[in-house]
Structures are given as C-alpha cells and as structure tokens.
Image: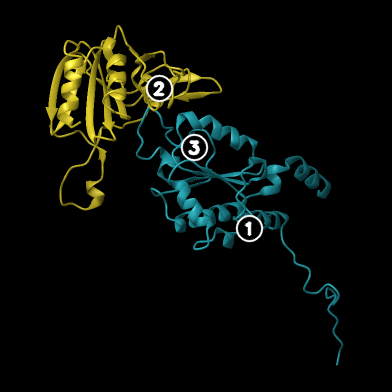
Chain colours: A yellow, B cyan
C-alpha cells in the first residue's frame, strides 16, 4: 500500500471519528477524540502496519479550552510513512486511555507526560513519576509553573528551593562582540 | 690541634632521621594519598575519567585510588549537575566518608548550578556540603582538575590537623609541657 492508500483506508474506516485532517510537508495529522484513541491506534498498528511509536508528547495551551493537546507520532517501518494523531484533553477530565499495551514504548512516554504535565493515563500498568520523585507536588512543564520553580520539602527524600534568576531570563544578544560580551546574561529582553 | 667532636652526630642513624612538626608530617602523608570518591553526575565525570587515565594520570598526585565505597575515601569530587533528586543522596554519601574529608566542586554545575537555573537543579553543592575547592569550567579540562587537586593539597598542608581532630590530646600535651 502506498501512503495515500493507507490514509484512504483509515479515512474510510473512521470517517465519522476523524475530526480534522491537516497535511504539512508531506506529513499527515489527524485530530481525533480521546474515546476513539485505542480503537484507531489498534487499527493503525494491525491493519496499516504503523509498528513504531516514535513519541508521545503533550502541549499546554494555558488559557484555552481544552487546555492540553497530546500528540502521538507514529511511523510505519514497512511503508516508511509518518502519521500523527492529536487529542484535545481538557483540564477537568485530564485522563486519556493508555496505549502502552499496543506499543510497549508508550509506557515511559506516558509516565513522562504524567510527571511533567499531570495528565493521567487509564489502564497504565505503572503510572508513577519518572523524572521527579514520588510525592513532588507540582507538574513542572505546565505554563502556570514558574520558571524559577516552587519550594517543596519531603524530609529525607528531596527538597526544592526557588532558583535565583537574578533578573533573568538569560538572553544572548546577537552581535559581533567578543564571546565574553555575547554570552547569555540576565538582561531584560529587548522587545 | 684540638680534637672536635660532634655530639649530636650518630653514624648509625645518620640520614634516617628528620625533624619536623607532627602536623607537617601528618599533612604530608595525607595530601599525597588522597583517595577520591568519584561522585560523577554528568559530563564532568568524563573529564574526571580522562584525568585518571594515562594521558593526564592523576596518580602523579597520589589520588589515583578512586573508591566507590565512601568508607574508604578522603575527598569527594562532585563532578556534575546535582539535581534535587540526587542532592540528599550525595549528602548521605558524604556523611559516610570518614574524617578527615574534603570536597572538590568540579565544574560550573557543582559550584553554582551552572547553566541550569531550573526547578530541578540544586544551585551549588555548597548548599549542602562544605566545599574546599571550586573548579571553574564546563566541564573543566583535566589540567584544571589537577590544579584544583594541587590547591587542595596546599590547603591540607596548611591545616592544623592534630589540634583540629584531637583537641583533647593537644590540651593534655600542652598541660603536661607547662
């Protein structure tokens, strides 16, 4: 099957479930609902040979509703084709079904999203934090989490303090000056 | 012609006796056999390994015996980014090292947090441990680590080791001598 045939087959099978299709530089992205994820994912793996889950990532559109977008990047080894799925997740729901039984590599990707963004995954076999420690009270990649961090304390396990940014953010001004003058410093960015 | 005798001269021990202060001898022994605890946490650890390897050869300064048990170490070389997740583990390892002990903060991250002005990174290991030598660089060259080690050796040789570590003994000696 060529790429067009693959996408045609997908569109025919799930005509009413694909909310939006976009193409950019030869790569196709489908926006689907969270409820249909597992069904479509299984179809993609078994029928269309998308056997490789490249990445799952999440986007925080703070201030918009629904707040989060989860992006699944798939690749088909036999066909050499990329495919992307986007899911919109509102903060109130904050739960998506796991695909870690469909692509085992999703296990750690989903743990990372849970750790950094606070989105939970239904049916995940081991949904614990992966980078921060169990009991850390914040989700650091959310937009409302401050750059310098927040203080926290777990006796005998770990603690965090607010980082001194000294008037940051740290910016590099492009110029032909020496590297001593060019290197990133705490300066007010020129707007 | 009068005959001269050197009263302090004894041919049997000549060349085998030196006079020095006790502290100086102790410090001399210590500074030339520092056993490092290689606390390699990031890319600085690669430079630490290079320093230990044949080209730079930290053995020239008597510090080649990297020990992975803190109970056998004298100096902790904190080489790399100390995250908050790791910070208390580093402190615990330091506490398991026997006295006397020293700490080298190797590189920008261990010294100040470096480029990681971040929620996840401790802004300098000196917030938890008493650091003796800071080494700049990101990562420092092996020469810089060796220079830092030599600075630490200088510092050790200036220490009043006995008085600091055995104050009761020194007190009793002073009483006995007066």
Q: Which residue is mark 2?
A: A111
Point out residue A19 in the picture as x, y percentages from the top left corner.
16, 14
Q: Which residue is mark 1?
A: B32
Q: Nearer the viewer, residue B111 or A19?
A: A19
Point out residue A108 in the picture as x, y percentages from the top left corner.
40, 26
Q: Measure the C-alpha gap from mark 3 to mark 2.
A: 32 Å
Are marks 1 and 2 in one subunit?
no
Residue drawn 17% across the image and 16% down it: A12
Q: Chain of mark 3?
A: B
Point out residue B33 in the picture as x, y percentages from the top left corner.
64, 55
Residue drawn 52% across the image and 33% down it: B128
Who comes first in sequence, dot 3 or dot 1? 1
In the depicted structure, whether residue A23 falls above or below residue A126: below
Q: Chain of mark 2?
A: A
Point out residue B132 in the picture as x, y percentages from the top left corner.
53, 45
In the displayed image of the protein, which residue is found farthest to the bottom?
A: B1
- Look at the numbered discs 1 and 2 and tell me whether their residues touch, using CB distance below 8 Å: no
Label 3: how many Cα within 10 Å (few below 14, some 14–19, many 20+)? some
Residue B126 got which mark?
3
In the depicted structure, whether residue B51 falls above or below residue B112: below
Are marks 3 and 1 in one subunit?
yes
Helix or strand or loop: what does disc 3 sit on?
Answer: helix
In the depicted structure, whether residue B16 falls above or below residue B164: below
Name the side, left or right, on which A160 lies relative to A176. Answer: right
Helix or strand or loop: what does disc 2 sit on?
Answer: helix
Name the side, left or right, on which A161 lies relative to B173. Answer: left
Q: Could you say which quadrant of the image residue B63 lies in?
A: bottom right
Q: Measure the C-alpha gap from mark 3 to mark 1.
A: 25 Å
- Look at the numbered discs 3 and 2 and tell me whether their residues touch, using CB distance below 8 Å: no
Q: Chain of mark 1?
A: B
Label 2: how many Cα within 10 Å (few below 14, some 14–19, many 20+)? many
Name the side, left or right, on which A122 lies relative to A27. Answer: right
């Amino acid at each position: 099957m060529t790429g067009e045939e693959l996408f045609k087959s997908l569109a025919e099978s799930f005509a009413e479930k694909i909310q939006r299709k976009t193409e950019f530089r030869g790569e196709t992205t489908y926006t689907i609902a969270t409820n249909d994820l597992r069904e479509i994912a299984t179809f993609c793996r078994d029928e269309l040979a998308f056997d490789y889950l490249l990445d799952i990532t999440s986007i925080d559109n703070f201030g918009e509703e629904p707040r989060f977008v989860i992006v699944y990047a798939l690749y088909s080894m036999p066909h050499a084709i990329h495919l992307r799925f986007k899911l919109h997740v509102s903060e109130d729901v904050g739960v998506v079904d796991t695909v870690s039984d469909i692509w085992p590599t999703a296990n750690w990707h989903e743990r990372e999203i849970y750790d950094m963004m606070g989105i939970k995954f239904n049916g995940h076999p081991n949904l614990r934090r992966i980078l921060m420690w169990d009991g850390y009270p914040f989700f650091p990649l959310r937009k409302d989490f401050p750059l310098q961090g927040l203080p926290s304390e777990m006796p005998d396990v770990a603690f965090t303090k607010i980082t001194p940014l000294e008037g940051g953010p740290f910016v590099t001004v492009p110029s032909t000056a020496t590297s001593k003058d060019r290197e990133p410093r705490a300066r007010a960015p020129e707007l | 012609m009068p005959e001269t005798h050197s009263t302090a001269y004894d041919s049997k021990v000549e060349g085998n006796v030196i006079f020095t202060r006790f502290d100086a001898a102790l410090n001399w022994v210590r500074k030339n056999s520092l056993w490092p605890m290689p606390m390699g946490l990031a890319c600085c650890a690669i430079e630490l390994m290079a320093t230990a390897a044949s080209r730079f050869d930290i053995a020239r300064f008597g510090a080649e015996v990297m020990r992975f048990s803190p109970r056998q170490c004298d100096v902790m070389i904190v080489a790399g980014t100390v995250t908050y997740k790791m910070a208390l583990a580093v402190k615990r390892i330091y506490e398991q090292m026997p006295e006397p002990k020293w700490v080298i903060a190797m590189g920008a991250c261990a010294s100040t947090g470096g480029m990681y002005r971040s929620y996840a990174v401790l802004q300098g290991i000196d917030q938890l441990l008493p650091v003796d030598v800071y080494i700049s660089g990101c990562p420092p060259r092996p020469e810089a680590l060796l220079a830092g080690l030599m600075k630490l050796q200088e510092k050790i040789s200036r220490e009043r080791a006995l008085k600091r570590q055995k104050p009761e003994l020194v007190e009793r000696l002073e009483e006995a001598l007066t």
